[in-house]
Image (cartoon, helix red, strand yellow):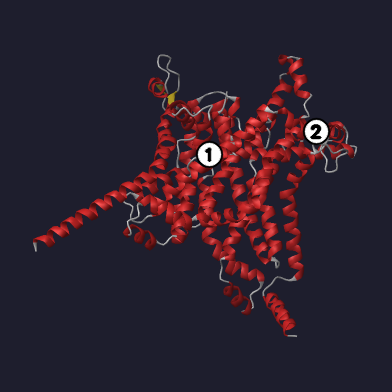
Amino acid sequence: MSETTAVSLKRRKRRINAVSVPAETIIHIIMILFCLFCIVPFIFVVIISFTSEESIRQIGYSFIPNEWSLEGYQYVMKMGTQLWRSYFNSFFITVVGTICSVLMCVLYSYALFRPDFKYRNFFMFISFFTMMFGGGLAPTYAVSKQLLGLHDNYAALIVPLLFSPFNIVIMRTFFQSSVPTELIESAAIDGSGEYNTLFKIVVPIAKPGIATIALFNALAYWNDWFTAMIYVRDAKQYIPLQYLLIKMQRDVQFLSQNSASLGAEAVKAAVNLPAQSLKMVLVVMIVVPITFAYPFFQRYIISGLTVGSIKG
Amino acid sequence: MSTAAVNVNTDLAKKKSARRKKTFMLTTMVLPGAIWLLLLRYLPMFGIILAFKDYKVYPKNPTLLQNIIHSKWVGFSKFKFIVASGNAWIMIRNTIGYNLIFIVLGLFFGVAFAIMLNEVTSKFVAKTYQTLMFFPYFMSWVVASYFLYAFLAPTNGLIPNMQKAKGVPADQIIDWYNYKKPWPFILIGARMWKGVGYGCVLYLSAITGIDSSLYEAASIDGASKWQQIKYVTLPHLKTMIVILIIMDVGKIFNADFGLFYNIPMASGLLTSVTQVIDTYVYSALMSTNDLSMSAAAGLTQNVLGFVCIMVANTITKKIDEESSLF
């Protein structure tokens, strides 16, 4: 008896300021439509990746293919070298890049977070200023390639994304909101060195913030194609997966536009691939790791975004 | 007496050296980042002089520095492309036009969806919506371009094949990648696809931070849902909206390169609707190898962007002290 009253009370309380039922229905319809808009392209590509080449030839890409097949995936397994090399590159760059960039970010933003750091304002400014002004693509490219030797090697794919002023703002804000300064002061009185304090005391407290930064960085590295497109021009062995996809598209266009000059053999070899489903298999291979990690890191990303939007 | 003074002295000296040590240690912490900033951000700023020189490789000693030193000064002649070529007007129009539309629509959909999501009774359902609409944010533009390609591809795409199945004659089937008209809408749609979920999450977290007693008070006073949105929700979001707009306005001359480079799949026929400053700078650098012109275009872009962000910030400061970015 009392239970039902409680339930009805609860329901009535919810109803006081809730939107009307028709209004909520409309909201649901809009939301469902938009969610479909967001997610259906991915589902479609997954379906295409499992479609047989024959079916694509007959009815094109379709949500209901005539014939399912694993031939795209089988081909990927056999194709070996370039593709797996690229897959490895993407993983390697993501892992190494994320570790290095997180370390740099934590160190930099921790020093900025310390109110008693003498050069705090200076280092804050030099980081913040680059958010508003920069040399531009061409000078950056010239300096990186010719002075720093960032071309056709792993460093070229990792170094340009190592540091992000935006992440510094997020991390520093996170330190400010979660680490009490008294803790650092008392650690100093106990004779703890600066690095010891940071890694033994502050880092464990700031774990959620660090996870956010790590995920931002991992995503940036995994999804990067621009750096590769600019700095990896000749050495095929350093091409990451994302750039491989761009190259495949452009190369097919290149082949079809220049078929006369290239000779029939090369064109034939390119045309005989299960090219249609193969591309989509690659897309799926890129997206699947993100999809699996997504539910776990969504929470962190959201908290990171929220913190980041607070005035820096 | 004298021992006390000595004690104080040594104490002071100790404190001083401790402080110095602390400053030193903290400086070593910022060092990796500072070196990165110096090499990859500040050094290129000196490269801006490239824009005022006619960059030529110096054959005797072809290092970057020597090349720059031995290249001829040409003043502002590398900036002529802005007035000289018809392309400049098109790409500037595209860059600003698209960005303005992105800002307005992104703001509208982000806020509207966040408010709607906040009204969904079941938290689980709301969470599911949020997860699904946030998904595209994690996709790269390369991947997104293939998502679109699956629908529009010339021979195999879903839409051309649906037309074929309906019996549309072959010459009337739309060749999407060679047909300009729908592309502004496609690009805007793609951008909304990727960005609205992000904006929505951002605004939603701000909305959930609003004290719920404000809404209760408002509803007891007889405020309708619309009035509550107008007088409680939106004023609370104001600061955040203003900051995000300032940041976007500061980037109004910087197009989303990935979007404009990848989504049209490099179709030359679409240039007049897809060319933006960034893609121009890129192709000037990579295809024509004109470092100076590319630097000039980039510099123009950066200076204008810098002015924009300053102006936007000053204006907001005048109107509302608290909302400004810095």
Determine the secondary structure under disc 1: helix
**Label 1 marks which chain's residue?**
A
Image quarter where the C terminus of chain A lies is bottom left
How many angstroms separate mark 2 from mark 1 (CA)? 33 Å
How would you rate the neighbour count of disc 2 (Cα within 10 Å): few for under 14, some for 14-19, many for 20 or more? Answer: some
Q: Which residue lies furthest to the bottom in this view?
A: A1
In the image, residue B111 sits, relative to residue A266, either above or below, namely below
Indicate which disc, 2 or 1, sits on the residue closer to the N terminus: 2
Residue under label 1, please give it: A96
In the displayed image of the protein, which residue is found farthest to the left? Answer: B2
Residue linked to disc 2: A71
Q: How many labels does the image show?
A: 2
Which numbered tag is attached to residue A70? none
Dot 2 falls on which chain?
A: A
Q: Which of A82 and B303 is in front in this view?
A: A82
The answer to which quarter of the image holds residue A257 is top right
Residue A58 at x, y percent in the picture: 87, 33
Q: In terms of depth relative to the viewer, which is nearer, A199 or B190?
A: A199
- The amino acid type, in three-letter code, at marker 2 is Glu
Q: Are there few (<14), some (14-19), or many (20+) residues within 10 Å of tag 1?
A: some
Snapshot quadrant of residue B200 = bottom right
